[in-house]
Amino acid sequence: MRIEISIPSSHMFLGVPDAVIQEIGSELPFSQSELDELSTSVIEACTNAIEHGNGLQEDLLALIEFEFSVGRFEVTVWDHGQGFEFEQRDFTKMPPDLMRERGRGLYMMSSFCDDISFARRDGLFGVKLTKIPREAEAPDSATG
Amino acid sequence: MKIKEREEAGVAILELSGKIMGGPDSEKFSSTLKQLIHEEKTRVLIDLGKVTWVNSTGLGILISGYTTMKRNNGEMKLLNVSERIESIFMVTKLASVFESYKDETEAIQSFVTD
């Protein structure tokens, strides 16, 4: 199943994808900590999208696609920015300076999700986050 | 993010609520701490019990507050960190930086014994 929403590029809307994940996820076989991990990651992706991709221009929307089944929850966040050279970055390593105030977003997404990937489409840059429940019993191809 | 301030036994307690996520939150938190430093209140306990979530920008706000207090010979400790926020501290290794308590009395006492 699939839901799409768009949010203006303002911090005040970052709670919207969190609410969607918590609501939908409560009907799926994810633990609360797994939902929180996905939600934290999606908030990071949306923060990047509205700040860096859309430059906090409220008239530019961040598009958020939620695709979910019993065995998988995928969220893709699209913005209007140029993106970055993701092939050359290793997101799995924590930034070396523990007290650095910025620069943890991609590392957090990579740590909390089972997969992270990037794409470009129609002038948009997207990050796709995948979360699989640890105790999923159903095959991940089952939708609906 | 909203900030409610009170004081117990010489410790300034800032009760944060809502989301810590950047935007105006950074300036609001920073100016509150600067005011406390100006008033020579350098023992600060941040109560996160009513904070629903923190993003990486919010982490930066807390780190900035921590270093600001340290630079001014003060201390900033945390109270009532939820499981959701604790998991972020664990992943980012910030759990080793922030001193965190579940009990307010114990947290206040820790400032005295430091």
Image: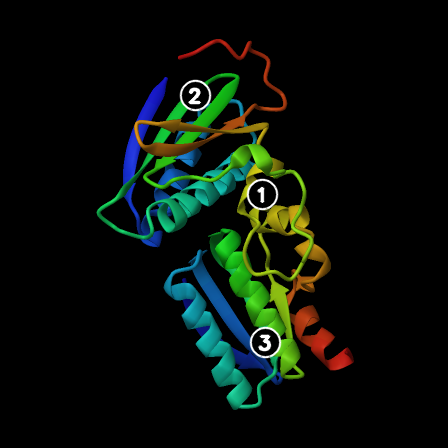
Classed neighbour count for the residue bearing mark 1: other residues with Cα under 10 Å, few (<14), some (14–19), many (≥20): many
Q: Secondary structure at mark 1?
A: helix
Going 65% across and 50% down the picture, which residue do you hit?
A95
Compared to A99, does B33 lie above or below?
Answer: below
* Mark 3 vs mark 2, CA separation in Å: 43 Å
Left or right of A27? Residue A99 is right
Horizontally, residue A52 falls left or right of residue B49, namely left
Dot 1 and dot 2 within a common chain: yes
**Quick one: label 3, few (<14), some, or many (20+) residues within 10 Å?**
some
**Residue B47 in the image: above or below residue A24:** below
Q: Nearer the viewer, mark 3 or mark 2?
A: 3
CA gap, disc 1 and disc 2? 21 Å
* Three-letter residue code for mark 3: Thr
Helix, strand or loop status at disc 3 = helix
Look at the picture and state if A68 lies above or below B106: above
Image quadrant occupied by the N terminus of chain A:
top left
Q: Could you say which disc has been placed on residue B3 in the image?
A: none
User: Could you tell me which chain the residue with mark 3 belongs to?
Assistant: B
Q: Does dot 2 land on a helix, a strand or a loop?
A: strand
- Judging from the image, mark 2 belongs to the subunit labelled A
Q: Which residue is mark 3?
A: B68
Q: Which residue is mark 2?
A: A68
In the rendered image, which residue does mark 1 sit on?
A108
Three-letter code, disc 1: Met
Contact flag, marks 1 and 2 (Cβ < 8 Å)? no
